Amino acid sequence: PTNSVLNDIVIGSLSLPLEIVSKGTILINIFAKDLKGNQSTAPDLKTLMQLGDLIMPLFQDVYYPEYRTEFAIEWSREYKVDNVLEWVYVIRIKANVLKN
């Protein structure tokens, strides 16, 4: 979130239709508070990457049978958010869910 003073992880879905086999896209956005210097701030890219490295194995080509859900990471990258002094690490995941 913009101007946050915390490390934040925001999870949302772009689409997850209510069908027998639902295919959707999930976005995980990781924010790390900036490093403060004497006169300026800099993104904490090291923390962004470390948090991404912790989360990625949970979604890299895995199947959770108790939830009948399969995840696969489509891509991940860090980037600067337009028009604000904010960096985010995004993990885009494909999800397949089999309804009962």
Image (spheres, helix red, strand yellow):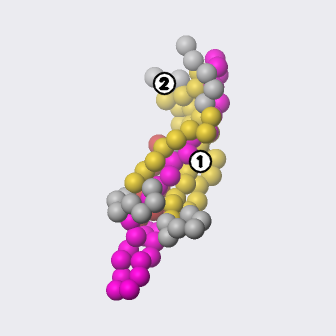
Q: Position of residue 75 (x, y in %)?
A: 62, 52
Tell me the kind of residue under disc 2. Answer: Tyr
Q: Residue at x 63, y 26 (%)?
A: 17
Q: Where is residue 45 in the image (x, y as percent from the top left)?
A: 47, 69
Q: Is mark 2 on a helix, strand or loop?
A: loop
Q: Which residue is drawn at 65% across and 30% down?
A: 23
Classed neighbour count for the residue bearing mark 1: other residues with Cα under 10 Å, few (<14), some (14–19), many (≥20): some
Regarding residue 57, the answer to whether it shows in the image is no
Classed neighbour count for the residue bearing mark 2: other residues with Cα under 10 Å, few (<14), some (14–19), many (≥20): few
Taking the magenta stretch, the answer to whether it contains residue 70 is: no
Q: Quadrant of residue 80?
A: bottom right
Q: Name the residue under label 1.
A: 92
Mark number, residue 67: 2
74 vs 89, left or right, is: right
Mark 2 or 1: in front is: 1
Q: Is mark 1 on a helix, strand or loop?
A: strand
Magenta-highlighted residues: 19-46
Q: Residue at x 57, y 18 (%)?
A: 99
Which image quarter is the N terminus in? Answer: bottom left
